[in-house]
Amino acid sequence: MIRPTRPAPRAAIATILFTCLVACLALVLGVRAGMAETFAYVGNADSNNISVFKIAENGEMTPVQTAAFTGVEKPGASTPLAITPDHRVLIAGVRSQPFLAVSFAIDPKTGQLSHIGNGPLADSMANIATDRGGKVLFSASYGGNKVALNPLQANGVVGEPKQVIPTGLNAHAFLPSPDNRFVFATNLGSDQVLSFAFDAAAGTLTPSDPPLFKTPEKSGPRHFVFHPNGKFVYLIHELNGDVAAYSYEAKSGAWGEIQRTTALPEGFNGKESDKKPWAADIHITPDGRFLYASERTTNTLTAYKVDPTSGKLTTIGSVPTEKQPRGFNIDPTGRYLAAVGELSDGMTVYAIDQTSGALSKLKSYATGKKPNWVEFLKLP
């Protein structure tokens, strides 16, 4: 005779459900922890190396590696960095002869760097960047007044220069448009921005029509960044501290100025203090809501709110930062900003207020000597 099964007591059912819930949460959290680790890479010019940090959810940085430049003896003026779009390779530009691009493989689990090989650059390059497809490396030479295009080999090592193009004075940045159809180069000493059409299939550049547009005299256009929506461009000017907003026409590659403001903190008076503006870097949050600019004379970071419709900027305010902040960047979540100081040999991390965009200092960290560049990368 088969007896009917008694229903399980409520307490036992509750215990089973609770145990399952805890196990599921542990599984989810474990997967999340394993899938979303973010690293910061700092280029140190005088140390000839890269400081690698892991950033936690709360913005805390942990140093995990110092990667030396294999085959490089003399330090250069700065150390520009670029990461390929597939997140497999980091490339560092060396600004001492024989002018090399040093390629590192990025470990997808640990974020650490392993040297792959070195390739030739056309000159001492102040800025390097890959195209959106990761097939070529663009570079700009401040002292050599030129830009160049090098093919990237399958393993991430830079090949011989394919094109070397003379520019106006002091080429400083050379970056592709969001759709990879155009590449733009700032000429700091000639107050102009050059425009090139880019044939991604052939890997070649040709001058656009018109080939350039001018900026105000003695403004010194230096670095620029596209809005994530592709409709606007923001350009920082080294010599007068201006930050200019432009509309961007994707079809023609045309820039149209819509606003001009400043990266200088309130109260700055260059004539009275005998200190000249010396603006450096500019970056925008991944969601396009906030923009930031660094200024080296005052050692400050200035924050702006971005109007998503008009592209115009509203200044939020300035905060003190590392001494001579040549480079900084924003993490992929848009919650943290890390700035490095060439004369402080350090990096400060700030929290970005998600409502106002204001910066609040979290903590400072030692880097190598003369840090000037920061790249963030979320792995895998």
Image (cartoon, rainbow, N blue to C red):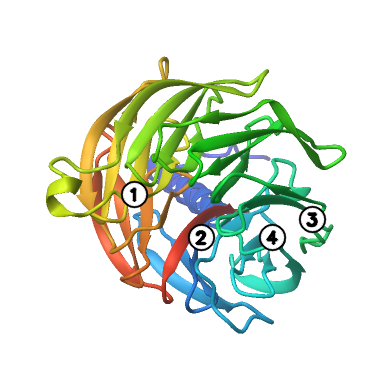
Residue at (39%, 30%) from the top-left corner? 244
**Rendering coords of residue 170 (x, y %):** 54, 51
Q: Amino acid at mark 1?
A: Ser
Q: Is residue 229 above or below residue 41?
A: above
Where disc 4 sits, the SS reads strand
Whole-angstrom CA distance, mark 4 to mark 1, is: 27 Å
Which of label 4 and label 1 is nearer to you? 1
Q: Nearer the viewer, residue 302 or 51?
A: 302
Q: Which residue is mark 1?
A: 294
- Comparing labels 1 and 2, the label whose residue is closer to the camera: 1
Disc number lying in front (3 or 2): 3
Query: Which of pointers 2 and 4 lies earlier in the amino acid sequence?
Result: 2
Which residue is under mark 3?
Answer: 152
| Residue named by callout 2 | 39
Among the two numbered marks 3 and 2 on one chain, the one whose residue lies closer to the N terminus: 2
Real-space Cα separation, disc 3 to disc 1, in angstroms:
31 Å
